[in-house]
Image (cartoon, rainbow, N blue to C red):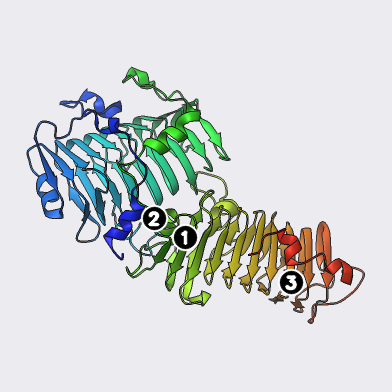
Amino acid sequence: MRTAALFALVAALVVIPAPAQAHDRADGFAGLSALGVDGTTGGAAGQTVTVDNQADLERYATAAEPYVIRVKGSIAMEPYGKEVEVASDKSIVGDGAGAEIVHGGFFLNGVHNVIIRNLTIRDSYVPGDWDGKSKDYDGVQMDGAHHVWIDHNHFTRTGDGLLDIRKDSDYVTVSWNVFSDHNKAVGVGWTANVVTKVTFHHNWIRGTHQRNASIDNTEAAHWYNNYVQDTATYGTMIRGGGRLVVENSYYRNVPDPIVVKDPASQAVQRGNVFRDSPGRNDSAGAAFDPSSYYAYRLDPAERVPGIVTRGAGPQGRARPAPRRLTVALDGTGDFASIQAALGAAPRGAVITVKPGVYREMPRLWPGAGDVTIKGETGDPADVVVTYDLAAEAEKFYGGPWGAAQSATFSVQADGVTIRDLTFTNTAATSGHAVRTSGDRTAFDGTAFAGAYQADGHRAHLRDCQATGPVRGQGTTVLDGCTIRSAGPGAVITGGTVLVSASRLEGDADVALGNAGQVVVRDSWLGAHIKDDPWEGEGRYAEYRNTGPGASINADRPQLTDRQAREHTAASYLRGWRP
């Protein structure tokens, strides 16, 4: 990456109230006396030291004695992905705004009584490894640890999981953290034993794809007053023989918000709010009674977004994020993934993507609009964003992924412009390259290999190359595009679509449109277009088309010159000038 200083501009979040630092003993399961430990107090029994470099951090974190270790400023770990092994009886606490661990994290292996608080832990992502399979660079990983409190941190853009609670770790509390802009958020499990007891409260999970959280074989997982926002796949999942209670939490734009995966899994939910969160919302069994373990107070679920967005994460205010960001696979950019840059980008940002093949599934979430993404060279073949998930492929917990979740690139925000990139979905059957569901989405000089799903209000494609059909319910203008049909079916399915000054190519016989309102004008049509080119119920018309697939007959209604003046890009886009 370019510099740690630039990353610091985008890593911090919002103000954390002083009470976050006012108590030294954990609540939830980490606050209980068990296994020879009287609650989680970290290094409170030892000296307080301040560190600002990796050597001192490792020296005190691995010491046999208890310490409160205050981290000042930014510490960049070497080698890249280094996880500092933390010994028992330690508190590792950020000292004010800007305290962070960059390019690494922490490993808690069989230890106890550890507090990690008020830190940003970020940017150990391995370029090109979206699935996190090449390196196990977690933000915090605990194996067989107990009495651990993870409090008021921000985890983002790590190499694998942001937080992994593994191998019978027990008496853990995760509170007031932000988990953002990454593929895998929080995982609990990696064991056949039903042992782990863990509390999650007042955490903000946003802009992530999976493990939000994924909880496996827990004796008791208590999930309350958490805010889960803008996830690409499932929300909170219980697996194996695990038991889960979900209370007064808020889910916004989360498909399959609560999933009970296996026959032995149990989940009780009450008092939750679900907004724009379709799909599975499961309950099963009696789970457990959290109040039989400890006392706790619930905030009203309707107030959770405001409470959590104001209070979660490390102390201090973020400086304004830069408006010009660069993505590169070779470490010369600000970020190594497009998703990371999108998560950091403020309104009005311009993101330049350097050449390379980016295997990832970037999302622009609602509310994150007015962003431009452009390829550096101006040639879309130089910057390829690709993935390989079919719409009809089965989710590992049941049901098809569908177009919305399987698309390689998804735009849910308004006012987004994309220039000079290629988007592909290499799934053998119904791969969706792009899906748009926001308003005012503009593609300029962009290439698609796979279906384009247009479900937003208005989209404009200019000088684009598309291999695959255009589908959806939105209003779409294709202006000066080349559309190649790779198989049978229709060029356009559904929606309100204007194809103008474009070129339609292909081998197999295809229809121009199926359902919706479709006008094709001033375009060259290849011989693959059927003589009777319209299928299904809809409103169809052509105007001044040429080429071997163009003809005028009773099955092909034509616009008059006067009618043609009403079917222009301007009339379809209704006041928007991309």
Give the side of residue 491 with respect to residue 178, left or right.
right
Q: Nearer the viewer, residue 564 or 36?
A: 564
Q: Amino acid at mark 3?
A: Ser
To which residue does mark 1 refer?
Answer: 349
Label 1 vs 2, first from the N-terminus: 2
- Whether residue 201 is visible, yes or no, is yes
To which residue does mark 2 refer?
Answer: 321
Marks 1/2 in contact by CB < 8 Å: the verdict is yes
- Residue 45 pos. (x, y %): 10, 31
From mark 1 to mark 3, how far is it between C-alphas? 30 Å
Residue situated furthest right in the rendering: 554
Q: Nearer the viewer, residue 225 or 189?
A: 225
Give the side of residue 470 with respect to residue 359, left or right.
right
Using the image, determine if residue 31 lies above or below residue 159. Answer: above
To which residue does mark 3 refer?
Answer: 500
From mark 1 to mark 2, how far is it between C-alphas? 9 Å
Q: Quadrant of the N terminus?
A: bottom left
The residue carrying pointer 2 sits among few (fewer than 14), some (14 to 19) or many (20 or more) residues within 10 Å by Cα, namely some
Give the side of residue 366 with respect to residue 344, left or right.
right
- Residue 185 pos. (x, y %): 38, 46
* Disc 2 secondary structure class: loop
Q: Residue at x 77, y 60 (%)?
A: 514
Q: Which of labels 3 and 2 is toward the front?
A: 2
